[in-house]
Structure formats: structure tokens, C-alpha cells
Image: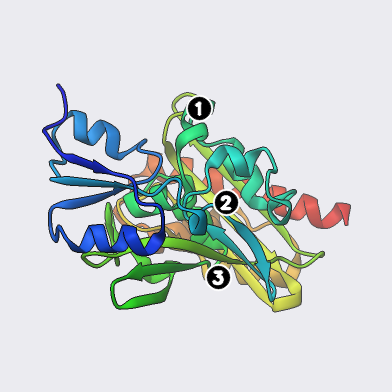
Amino acid sequence: MKAALFEYVRPATLEEGIRLLGEAPGSAKVMGGSQSLGPMLNLRLARPKRVVDVTALPEMREVALQGGVIRIGAAVTHAEIEDGVFPPLRGTLLQTVASGIAYRAIRNRGTVAGSLAHADPAADWVLTMTALAARIELAGATGSRMVPMERFMLGAYTTELAEGELISAVHVPQLGDDARWGYSKFCRKTGEFAEASCCAVFDPGRAFARVVVGALDGAPQALPAIASAVAESGALPSRTEIDKALAAAAPGKDAIDRKLMTAAVLRCLEQAVAKEKLQ
């Protein structure tokens, strides 16, 4: 199939982009890398009257370190993070995660904000940004507002974005030199969405510890008991402890799903503990 007829506009500034969205309430879509919206247009699952392409907006193409927080412009691509184009992101968890997203052709076009706005439960960025306690910067006609990632994704393909708003940036806390982290996922084959995934972040300088599982039926879920135990002891939990935590966090999963999830959590934590031993 081909997309239904729509007006394509490419604003020069963020202010103009917000104005163009506001002029077509309920019938405009924001286009980032178009790796999700493009197929939806072609299948006519989405039929907007106007598509606003924000990939070239200067305000959304920058990465800056500001007061211990890395501000990532919404139109930054996965490939740019993978390739270390922006110094504040080199050698970070984000660079590792970016290198494993789908295929290189998709990473060349796909954007951080596009993935978050689409809110696929199996996506890498929704899990990673939840584990990092990122904050999402939303811009609209009335100004901008910050929303914690835990409140941004409301469910599968459902977010806090209001009519006429777009994601302008993602704010991620800079991890300390003694921080450690892990990331693991299982896919049917390389490049596909995850069947089970886990991200763990431990930053002793901020007394921050979080273990989060993804690829669920909705938003990622934290495993606070597991995070606290690993942070305090530095030792890996048993499979029984992990399975118990997963049963509470994802009660709808069957035994096979939980086995995959347990393995993803364990491998993720093994990475984090191994990093601690190397420091």
C-alpha cells in the first residue's frame, strides 16, 4: 500500500514546528527518523493530514553537558550515538545500547525521541531511559515542561505527550567514574525487537541503584529489591530471587517467558558486577 495524501512540511526552527503542529490539531504527526511512522503511513495505520519533519531543527541536533546532566537533542540518531559523534556520550551505556538497536540502516535514520514517542514496550531506549531515570523535555505552544521517564510512557504505544507537543530533548544524569551498568536482551534473531530485556545502573556517588526489565506488555518495570541487594553486597542474586521479583513485576508472564527474563536479568547483572571488579 501507499500512504494516504498528506501535507509534508519541514520547519526551520522549533518554534515554527510547534506552530505548524498547532495549526492542525488532531490531524498532524511529528516525523523524526520515520522508522516507525513511515511504515504506519504506508500501511495507512496512520492517516495524518500534515506531517511535520523535525529532523533538521538545530535545537534538536545538539548534545551538551550541563551541570551533571547530558541534554540529548531529540533528533540525534542512534548511529551518531553509536559512533561517538558527541563527546559527552562516548564510552557510556547509551553508546553501548545504540550499537545494538536493530540494523545499521535503521540506526542511521532512527532518532532517540522518535523511539520514545512511539513507546514500543520492546524498544531499547524506553528501557534504558527508565533505568537511567531520564527526564523528557516536552515543548508546545504554551512552553516546555519536564516529565520523568517513569511517567512519560503510560503503556504500550501510549505516552504523556499532549496534543500539539513534541519531544525536544532527553535529559540524562551523568554517571560518576565509579558507576557500573549492564544491558542484556534476547531476540529471535539479531536486529529484531527483544523478547526479554534488562538494564541495570549503579552509581554509588549518587546512591543510585536501579534494575529494570523491558519487553513487557506495557512500560518497563523496576526490580527495587534486586537493585538494593546488588548495590549493598556487590554479589549476584540467585535465580530464585530474580524469578520471585519478576513474578511481582510481571505477573502475567508464563514460565517460559519468565525463564527468558530471568536469564536477561542475570546476564545484565553479571556485566555490572564484572565492571565493578575491573575498577
Q: Which tag is nearer the camera, tag 3 or tag 2?
A: 3
Q: Residues within 10 Å of mark 3 (few under 14, many from 20)?
A: some
Q: Is residue 132 left or right of residue 163?
A: right
Q: Is residue 273 left or right of residue 8?
A: right
Q: Which tag is nearer the camera, tag 1 or tag 2?
A: 1
Q: Residue at x 74, y 52 (%)?
A: 87
Q: Are marks 1 and 2 in contact (CB under 8 Å)?
A: no
Looking at the picture, how far across and down is residue 29, in whole percent? 23, 50
Between the residue at mark 1 and the residue at mark 2, the CA separation in whole angstroms equals: 32 Å
On screen, residue 241 above or below 94? below
Of pointers 3 and 1, the one earlier in the residue sequence: 1
Q: Amino acid at mark 2?
A: Arg
| Residue at numbered disc 1 | 103
| Residue at numbered disc 3 | 225
The numbered disc on residue 239 is 2
Looking at the picture, how far across and down is residue 54, in whole percent? 38, 49
Q: Residue at x 14, y 61 (%)?
A: 25
Between the residue at mark 3 and the residue at mark 2, the CA separation in whole angstroms equals: 14 Å
Looking at the picture, how far across and down is residue 110, in whole percent? 45, 39
Is residue 119 in view from this perspective?
Answer: no
Q: Is residue 9 left or right of residue 72?
A: left
Q: Amino acid at mark 1?
A: Tyr
Q: Nearer the viewer, residue 187 or 240?
A: 187
Q: Residue at x 70, y 43 (%)?
A: 84
Q: Which tag is nearer the camera, tag 3 or tag 1?
A: 1
Circle 3 sits in a helix, a strand or a loop, which is it? helix
Quarter assignment of residue 123? top left
